[in-house]
Image (spheres, helix red, strand yellow):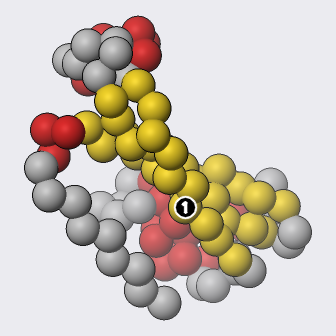
Amino acid sequence: MSPELDANLEVAAGRPATLLAGLIQQCGQVFSSGACEISAAVAGETRAKLLGLKAADPVLLFVQLAEFEGTPVYLAKCIVTSRIGHLSLVQSG
């Protein structure tokens, strides 16, 4: 990883926002592109135990990636269960 991102990672992670938003606040717009991969899955034994779900419960997985100097950087994984009810996705530039 870049020394700039590495030096700002802890502060960015401590902000009340996503890691991506925190890094942009700390370093400026250093990412060239990004993506959020959304997939349907089951909670699985480990996640279910952590989240108080059954292993076979359906979930949506959101994996947030951003590209830094041509290299994809993993930034977040969010798990959404049916308990959430209504889900809205908003993307802003």
Asked where in the image residue 29 lies, by quadrant, the reply is: bottom right
In-image side of 53 versus 70 (left or right): left
Q: Residue at x 12, y 49 (%)?
A: 85
Outermost residue on the bottom side: it is 93
SS of the residue under disc 1: strand
Q: Residue at x 80, y 55 (%)?
A: 1
> Label 1 belongs to which residue?
36
Outermost residue on the right side: it is 70
Asked if residue 59 is positioned above or below residue 28 in the image, the reply reads: above
Give x and y (percent) for residue 52: 20, 17
Of residue 20 and residue 57, the one placed in the foreground of this image is: 57
Give x and y (percent) for residue 57: 29, 22
Asked where in the image residue 80 lies, by quadrant, the reply is: top left
Residue 3 visible in rendering: no
Three-letter amino acid code of the residue under disc 1: Cys
Asked if residue 83 is positioned above or below residue 9 in the image, the reply reads: above
Count of numbered circles in the view = 1
Q: Residue at x 25, y 38 (%)?
A: 81
In-image side of 17 versus 9 (left or right): left
In-image side of 59 versus 69 (left or right): left
Give x and y (percent) for residue 49: 30, 11
Give x and y (percent) for residue 2: 81, 61
In-image side of 7 versus 26 (left or right): right
Q: Residue at x 48, y 90 (%)?
A: 93
Residue 56 visible in rendering: yes
Asked if residue 58 is positioned above or below residue 93 in the image, the reply reads: above
